[in-house]
Image: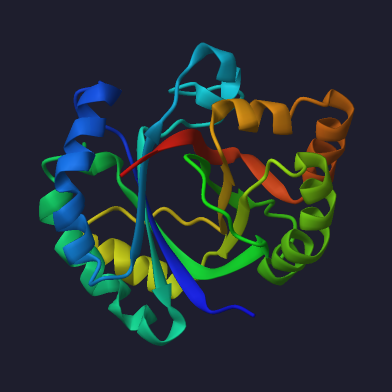
Amino acid sequence: MQTHWRLALMFDTAERDLGVLAGKLSRAGEAIRAAALGHHVRMGIADCHVDLGIYGIRGNLKGWAGVDGAIEISVANAAKEEIPGICRALRPIMAGLCDLATVQVMAGPMHHMVPVRNGGTFLSLAFRRDPRITSAQFQDWWYNRHSKVAIPVLGDGLLAYDQVHVEQSISLAAAEAFGATYAEYDAYDNLTWTDRYGFLKSISNEDDMARVNADEVGHIDMSSRRSAIMTEIR
């Protein structure tokens, strides 16, 4: 049963120093949680460890845009109207954390595709649907088909898999409240592992991953992808 919406803010650090960003996020944690009105918050910075290869890269590869940090706020369905106000309250806090010109904001109903267990590494990923299919076709494929392809491949090390089906009107309102240029996405994808090595083990079978990638063809606009493997900041 779908019970929560997720607000996601993706951004880059002005200093291009992830260690500085980690410290700033940690110190701002109390203020961020206050701005989130008590809703659950998860924060992370990109893990650019060499073992991650393309998954930890900062910058463009195959048309993929990297991201330095993410803040995710999970809001009960009944409180989703609070999302723009949360964004408005976050802006002055984030002005001291990141390059505000890089902030992208999105929100939508969140679906837990596997039972949630906590972990310290998560994928922060936003993308658009292939323009040749409708939003309804994309959502049906992502929820009903792609999850059934990906979950068995990723295995028991996958601790959580949350699909956020981005809702355009509230995302636009959230971006405007924050003061960010609106970037239209169809999906915000979250997968969680214990650590980076759990993630790497999860994607280690090349044949299985080829099946996952093949299923995405004709459904995801890969040129729109913005993502990074994140280390959670508490």
Choose between 146 and 233: the one closer to the eye.
233
Q: Give the residue furthest to the top.
A: 50
106 to 13, vertically: above or below: below
Task: Say which quarter of the image contains residue 85.
Answer: bottom left
How is the structure coloured here? Answer: rainbow
Q: Is residue 230 left or right of residue 194?
A: left
Q: Residue at x 23, y 72 (%)?
A: 37
Q: Residue at x 32, y 71 (%)?
A: 173
How far across and down, in percent of the image, does residue 174 sit?
31, 67
156 to 202, vertically: above or below: below
Q: Quadrant of the C terminus?
A: top left
Task: Say which quarter of the image contains residue 98.
Answer: top left
Choose between 69 and 167: the one closer to the eye.
69
Task: Say which quarter of the image contains residue 67.
Answer: top left
Q: Quadrant of the N terminus?
A: bottom right
How far across and down, in percent of the image, does residue 86 sit?
24, 68
| Count of picture labels | 0
How far across and down, in percent of the image, does residue 88 sit?
18, 65
Q: Residue at x 38, y 79 (%)?
A: 80
How far across and down, in percent of the image, does residue 62 sit?
61, 24
36 to 58, vertically: above or below: below
Q: Residue at x 60, y 25 (%)?
A: 197
Choose between 201 and 147: the one closer to the eye.
201
